[in-house]
Amino acid sequence: MNIRLWNLQMKTLVWTFKGHKNPVWSIAFSPDGRYAAAGVWVENIVTLWDIATGRLVREFVGHNNWVNSVAFSPDGHYIISGSSDHTLRLWRVETGECLQLMQHDGNHSVRSVAFSPNGRYAVSGGDETLRLWDLQTGSCLDILKGHSDDVYSVAFSPDGRYVISGSKDETLALWALDWELEDYHPADWDEGARPYLDIFLTLHTPYAPDGLRRVGKPQWTEEDFQKLLQELGYRGYGWLRPEGVRRELEKMAKERK
């Protein structure tokens, strides 16, 4: 049971990631495009693959039933997985450590999971409900009821104000989330925003001739920078001053080898 990476422009097969003995039910790219995470049936694991080399980097072991859904956090440092063992697990990408174990429901598989745009929360779908989770504490903040059958797919809007869900009951539901927005004073910089600048720099570094690795110095336009500011707003850092973000971005670009 293999994973295949395709070049869409050339319509060619780039890599075949070999190693799974059972079906791969879910797959996700990391935000910087360096890795892919796969959720595997029967083996009950999440695997992490290096896109440039086709190498298996790490296995995340802990579920005791099929893994149905995987997603990367917006900063790329975490993976969340949903399983037929009725749980969600939050994993640290760098170490494979399970940071949180969350019980969605005792009788239904977790079929879909998604991170909020700021990476602090997650939503899961399994039975006829959606559940909203605080990932720092692992606590369920809310149960969203309205579907009449299992929820198969969930996603946040880019600004985090809405969740959309698709169900076996043949409906889509749009949910408005009543967040209490934190009031921050404007500042030049916050270290919590660094991973998003790292991702930006990676995505704006030219590809090597093989089309897999990125080499050279990052390059971006003013339009690209404005999109970065918008992205930071979605991630909860809209209070950062543009001039402060620009200085830090230019500093980080110079430090890259």
Image: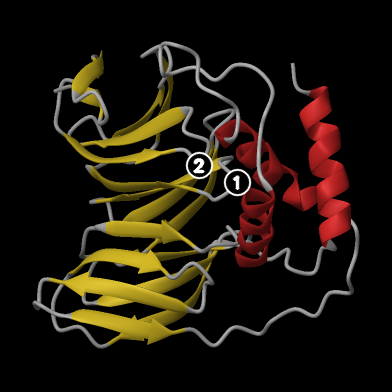
Q: Which SS class for mark 2?
A: loop
36 horizontally vs 23: left or right: right
For marks 2 and 1 on the same chain, the one whose residue lies earlier in the sequence = 2
Q: Is residue 163 above or below residue 9?
A: below
Label 2–label 1 contact, CB within 8 A: yes
Along the viewing direction, whichever of 27 and 59 lies nearer the viewer = 27
Can residue 106 be seen? Answer: no
Q: Residue at x 19, y 20 (%)?
A: 12
Residue 75 tag number: 1
Along the viewing direction, whichever of 240 and 141 lies nearer the viewer = 240
**Quadrant position of residue 131:** bottom left
Q: Residue at x 54, y 88 (%)?
A: 178
Measure the alpha-carbon separation of dots 2 and 1. 7 Å
What residue type is disc 2 on? Pro
Q: Is residue 209 above or below residue 201?
A: above
Tell me which colouring the rendered structure shows.
secondary structure
Q: Residue at x 10, y 71 (%)?
A: 168
| Residues packed near mark 2 inside 10 Å, few (<14), some (14 to 19) or many (20 plus) | some
What residue type is disc 1 on? Asp
Residue 24: x and y, percent? Answer: 20, 34
